[in-house]
């Protein structure tokens, strides 16, 4: 984002505007944290700002300051469409292509609002009027911090805003263990703690609120774990029946794929989750080293993301999806065995 872009955005935000802030479908900690962090800032400037999420988000995020103000497009479409169609400015956070918003894609694409993207995923589309895109960043929340810094607005960070940004950085870095975590990331975290973010309480709220059924579901997932040693790959499956038997709730499978990746000598991990309501198989991919699951997902499963973390989907059955995954691995064996 150029100096001229920043000057123009400052001018845009210098007078009251109607603003919508949009995360991707099935928003995670970074999507919710970054949108809420930006919301806190815009409200301090007296803008009429609203977050519109494509659908609901996990219960372990439903304590973050102002999360209860988020509109859900899937249940509040009429109100959401009106806000989008009348918005002066639209911020899109933690995604870079409108199809990542599901049923919101058309109304967002047709909006006459000035569009500002803040995102750290690879290969962004060219829809925004202003683009802040950096794939080297740990998280969109880290980018929001830098965005505020560019706007000379860090003085507006209080405890609530700091808490929002801390959540996204923590979750998207795997509690600061992924390679995207840099010295700058830690410096920002230190600043957020100084502003009032309670690191211990935030971690407890996100990670230490397991239900009995979620732990039972984890046990089921681990019992379904399979290893393909010739491809240094492990994968997990969860059928719709298994999810229903254990009273699955949104967010319950968060982090399950990392158990597969934690196996000794495994470079690639996947989880395949059956979703009969949407007639798809949800896919999450993780990797180590320089093996790109972003490339694999884009090439075979209509997805994308980062080098070491990506998502995708399949429109075939659970068993057929797994068979396809296994069938494509030989073309990657050389790369997987040289990480």
Image: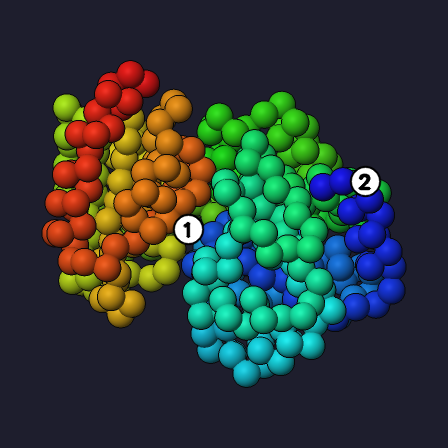
Position of 181 relative to 139 (above/below):
above
Quadrant of the frame with the N terminus: top right
Q: Give the x, y percent position of residue 110.
A: 58, 71
Task: Work out whether residue 154 can be spotted.
Answer: no
- Quarter-wise, where is residue 67 in the image? bottom right
Say the numbered circle drawn on residue 337.
none
Quadrant of the frame with the C terminus: top left
For the point 24% across and 21% down, which residue is it? Answer: 334
Q: Give the x, y percent position of residue 160.
A: 69, 52
Residue 177 placement, left or right of 194? left
Q: What is the image's colouring?
A: rainbow
Task: Work out whether residue 101 can be spotted.
Answer: yes
Crowding near the residue tagged with mark 2, few <14, some 14–19, many ≥20 C-alpha atoms within 10 Å: few
Question: Which residue was labeled with disc 1?
Answer: 209
- Dot 2 or dot 1: first in sequence order is 2
For the point 27% across and 40% down, which residue is it? Answer: 270
Q: Tags 2 and 1 in contact by the CB under 8 Å rule?
A: no
Residue 210 placement, left or right of 172? left
Position of 84 relative to 261 (above/below):
below
Badge 2 marks a residue whose secondary structure is: helix
Q: Residue furthest front?
A: 126
Q: Residue furthest top?
A: 338
Task: Name the residue nearer the viewer: 288 or 256.
Answer: 288
Question: Which residue was labeled with disc 2?
Answer: 3
- Quarter-wise, where is residue 58 in the image? bottom left
């Amino acid at each position: 984002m150029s100096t001229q872009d920043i000057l123009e955005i400052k001018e845009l935000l210098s007078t009251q505007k109607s603003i919508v802030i949009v995360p991707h479908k099935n928003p995670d900690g970074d999507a919710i944290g970054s949108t809420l962090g930006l919301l806190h800032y815009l409200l301090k400037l007296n803008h009429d700002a609203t977050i519109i999420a494509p659908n609901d988000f996990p219960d372990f995020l439903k304590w973050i300051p102002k999360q209860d103000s988020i509109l859900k497009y899937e249940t509040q479409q009429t109100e959401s469409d009106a806000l989008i169609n009348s918005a002066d400015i639209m911020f899109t956070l933690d995604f870079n292509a409108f199809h990542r918003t599901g049923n919101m894609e058309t109304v967002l694409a047709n909006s006459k609002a000035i569009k500002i993207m803040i995102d750290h995923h690879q290969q962004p589309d060219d829809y925004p009027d202003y683009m802040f895109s950096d794939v080297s960043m740990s998280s969109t929340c880290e980018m929001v911090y830098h965005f505020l810094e560019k706007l000379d607005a860090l003085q507006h960070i209080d405890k609530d805003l700091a808490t929002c940004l801390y959540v996204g950085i923590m979750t998207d870095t795997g509690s600061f263990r992924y390679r995207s975590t840099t010295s700058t990331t830690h410096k920002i975290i230190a600043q957020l703690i100084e502003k009032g973010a309670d690191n211990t309480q935030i971690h407890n709220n996100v990670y230490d609120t397991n239900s009995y059924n979620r732990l039972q579901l984890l046990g089921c997932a681990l019992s379904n774990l399979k290893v393909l040693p010739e491809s240094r790959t492990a994968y997990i499956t969860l059928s719709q029946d298994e999810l229903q038997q254990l009273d699955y709730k949104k967010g319950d499978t968060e982090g399950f794929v990392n158990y597969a990746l934690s196996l000794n000598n495994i470079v690639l991990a996947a989880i395949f989750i059956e979703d009969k309501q949407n007639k798809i198989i949800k896919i999450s991919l993780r990797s180590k080293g320089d093996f790109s699951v972003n490339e694999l997902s884009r090439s075979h499963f209509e997805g994308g993301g980062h080098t070491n973390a990506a998502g995708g989907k399949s429109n075939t059955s659970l068993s057929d999806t797994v068979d396809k995954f296994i069938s494509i691995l030989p073309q990657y064996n050389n790369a997987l065995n040289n990480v």
